[in-house]
């Protein structure tokens, strides 16, 4: 086996000398302040030109007046989850556990049970989603073979006083029971 041995050549690189200015990051601090002040003055100039009536200078900073003017979401926006029902009113979920398996945040927990209906092998005894952990990626919607879960509830104001209140169970996801936020226990 007449192989050729190859050697690695080592090359030493001389680092630039560290001076007092590089040690205290003075140049980098001044560069960052320059960028900040440039953005400040450009936005001030654009707003002043817009106030005078000149519109050809591009948009300045945009402030959204959130509670008064709620944001409009597109049709494909992923908002809060909801479970769908079959024609007979039962949940469409067959407890196949695909959504629980594919979830990267591991925020979906399903307990399966045998269904009394002979056409359906299993059903979900409990279906919980921890919206405090959810990253709203939409993988659960894509993985569902029976189209039982959607993320089109158009509800984005999901808040609670405790982590326990961020866990939504099956009646809340089906829309049968509205979510009641508990009040904090402090005075």
Image (cartoon, helix red, strand yellow):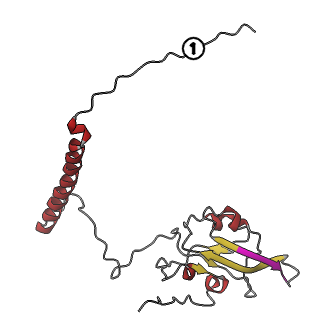
Residue 118: percent from left, percent from top: 88, 81
Q: Residue at x 60, y 81 (%)?
A: 168
Quadrant that contains the C terminus = bottom left
Question: Over which residues does the magenta segment extend?
Answer: 110-115
- The overriding secondary structure of the stretch rendered in magenta is strand
**178, 118: nearer the viewer:** 178
What is the x, y in percent for residue 85?
70, 82
x and y, in percent, of residue 4 in the image: 65, 9
Q: Nearer the viewer, residue 105 or 23?
A: 23
Please determine whether, in this image, residue 31 is positioned above or below residue 44. Answer: above
Give the vertical position of 103 relative to 109 (above or below): above
Q: Position of residue 95 (x, y in %)?
A: 76, 73
Residue position marked by numbered label 1 in the rendering? 7
- The question of residue 25 being in magenta is answered with no
Q: Secondary structure at mark 1?
A: loop
Is-magenta flag for residue 111? yes
Q: Quadrant of residue 133?
A: bottom right
């Amino acid at each position: 086996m007449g192989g050729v041995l190859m050697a690695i050549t080592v090359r030493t690189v001389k680092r630039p000398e560290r001076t007092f200015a590089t040690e205290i990051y003075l140049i980098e601090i001044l560069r960052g302040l320059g960028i900040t002040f440039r953005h400040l003055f450009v936005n001030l100039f654009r707003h002043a030109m817009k106030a005078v009536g000149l519109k050809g200078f591009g948009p300045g900073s945009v402030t959204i007046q959130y509670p008064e003017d709620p944001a409009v979401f597109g049709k494909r926006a992923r908002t809060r989850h909801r479970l769908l029902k079959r024609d007979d009113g039962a949940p469409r979920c067959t407890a196949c556990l695909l959504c629980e398996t594919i979830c990267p945040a591991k925020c979906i927990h399903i307990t399966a049970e045998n269904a009394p209906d002979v056409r359906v092998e299993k059903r979900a005894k409990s279906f919980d989603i921890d919206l405090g952990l959810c990253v709203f990626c939409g993988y659960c919607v894509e993985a569902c073979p029976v189209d039982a879960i959607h993320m089109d509830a158009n509800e984005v104001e999901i808040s609670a006083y405790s982590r326990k209140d961020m866990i939504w169970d099956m009646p809340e996801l089906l829309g049968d029971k509205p979510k009641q936020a508990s009040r904090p226990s402090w005075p």
